[in-house]
Each structure stands twice: as structure tokens, then as C-alpha cells.
Image (spheres, grey):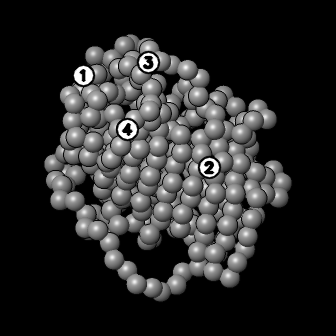
Amino acid sequence: MSDAGRVLLNLLDLERLDRNLYRGIGSGGETPTRIYGGQVIAQALTAAYATVPDRLCHSLHAYFIRPGDPASPVIYQVDPARDGGSFTTRRVTAIQNGKQILNLAASFHKEEPGWSHQHAMPDVPPPEGLQSRDELHQSHAHRIAEHMRDEFTRARPFEIRDVEPRDPLYPEISSDINHMWIRMEAAQGAGPQLQHVLMAYASDFGLLGSALRPHGITWFKPEAMTASLDHAMWFHAPVQFENWHLYTMDSPFAGNGRGFNRGSIYTRDGHLVASVAQEGLMRPINRQRTL
């Protein structure tokens, strides 16, 4: 396993402080200045799973309340809201320096039979013929400010291949539809709960970017203040995230300083395993205010 994969698994290995109380590491995620939203979601889901040993999560809904500080640990307080015959409900509050940074509600369901249908997976090129995002970043590294270069090119715990990659510094205005292939080496051999946690971690990566595409904006152009505001995810089927999955995203609406984004995650052979929705802040830089 890569060093980045080991760092990720260490981030998700919470310390139990007391009954329904856990502590997670803040540093080591996707950004050095604030805790990556997918990391807080994944740690909160890990805390919830620690209290639900016999059922799998089928949905979670989270609100990002404050930016997390990577320099400090995060405390996760689990409220065992309900243990029912078919469904189990947990509420998790992430706390840092005495203040809430995230609230998450998760529901767990006993496996049972039922009717099934799904939308077909989009027809896109396979990952083998696409350039990896790591290679793309390396090719653009000389154009990035020197103080940001190491962060821009460092290894990530997941492998991404964009179907239609954009120039990170001078992107063209493009469709909000955004496809990327993604997999995680760290998921190899993981149980079903950890597979969900790893996919939840990755689900926040690139989602808000769909709302930026029609406006020719990326995080490397100082034109917009961006932040995830909320995040919802539904797990439809078992996950083997060490294999390639297609994450197809779109943004049907942006306005009032916010962008709404949706995502569908398919296995390579076309099975829909998860759906995602998120609203994010995308405020013009000249109108910056505090969240």
C-alpha cells in the first residue's frame, strides 16, 4: 500500500474516549489550511459505525458548520437515536475547540429483498486510455507558484482519471457534466463498513467543481470563495472501492452565491452503487464575507 493510503487509514482509525465518544486526527488530509470535508464525513461515519456493528449505512446527511483546523484533533459525539427492527439511526456531532464543525445523521438498514431498477451508466471512455490526475498535475507543476507546488503534486490516497480534464490555471468554460474514474488502493481487503467510509471520503472530491465548470473557474484562480455547505449520500449496493468506479457529476443550478451538485457512482460494469448531492458556496472574491 502507498504511503498516502496508510496516512488515510490512520486518519480513519478513531480513538475511543468513552461510550459514544471518539477522537480523530485533523492533519494529513487533502488540504493543509482546513480539514477536507470528505475527511470529517468519513470520520463521523466511522464513529457512527463503531456503534452499529450489524447493519450497513444506506444514507447520510451532513451540514458543514465551521471550517476544521488540521492542527487540532476532532471529537465525535454519537447520539444513538434509534435501534429499530429494520432501521438504526445515529446522529454524530463533530467538535473542535468546543464548537461544532459538522452535524451528520446516518441511517442503517437490515438487508432485505425488494424491487430494483437503476439508470444506465453514461457511455464514457475507459480509464486505461486516460491520463491520471497525478500525471496531469506533474505536467502543470512548473506553472504553479513555488510555495504551492509541493501540495499540488503530492501523492493522494485515491487514483483519478478525468474523462475531460481542464487546465487548472486557465480553464475554458465547459459543460457542468463532469466524469471521472476513481479507485482507492487503500480499500483492498477492507470490510463493507470501511468500503463505505472510503467512498464517503472520496465523494466530496471534485463535486463542487461541477458548478465551477460553466464559469471557467478552478480553485487555483483567485476568483471565488468556495466551501462545501452540506453533503448527502445514499449507498445502494456493496462497494469494492479498490476497483475502478465512474463518478459522474453535474450541476443543474447555481445562483445566490451557491452551486448545487449531484453525483452518481457506478462500478465499471455499470451497477449504480451510490448517489451524492451537495450544495456549495461559490461567492465572487470581491464579495467575500465570513460564512
Q: Which residue is mark 4?
A: 254
Q: Which residue is mark 2?
A: 43
Q: Quadrant of the rendered structure where residue 63 is? A: top right
How far across and down, in percent of the image, does residue 211 sit? 35, 38
| Left-right relation of 117 to 274 | left
How far across and down, in percent of the image, does residue 86 sit? 63, 80
Pick the quarter of the image with the C terminus: top right
Disc with the residue nearer the chain's start (1 vs 3): 1
Q: Secondary structure at mark 3?
A: helix
* Residue 131 visible at all: no
The residue positioned 40% from the left and 84% from the top of the image is 115
115 or 260, which lies in front? 260
Q: CA distance from mark 2 to mark 1?
A: 34 Å
Q: CA distance from mark 1 to mark 3?
A: 17 Å
96 or 173, which lies in front? 173
Q: Secondary structure at mark 4?
A: strand
* Residue 89 visible at all: yes
Disc with the residue nearer the chain's start (1 vs 4): 1
Q: What amino acid is labelled 3 in the image? A: Ile
The residue positioned 71% from the left and 48% from the top of the image is 93
Q: What amino acid is labelled 1 in the image? A: Tyr
How far across and down, in percent of the image, does residue 101 sit? 67, 38
| Left-right relation of 215 to 235 | left
The label nearer to you, 4 versus 2, is 4
Q: CA distance from mark 4 to mark 3?
A: 16 Å
Q: Which residue is mark 1?
A: 170
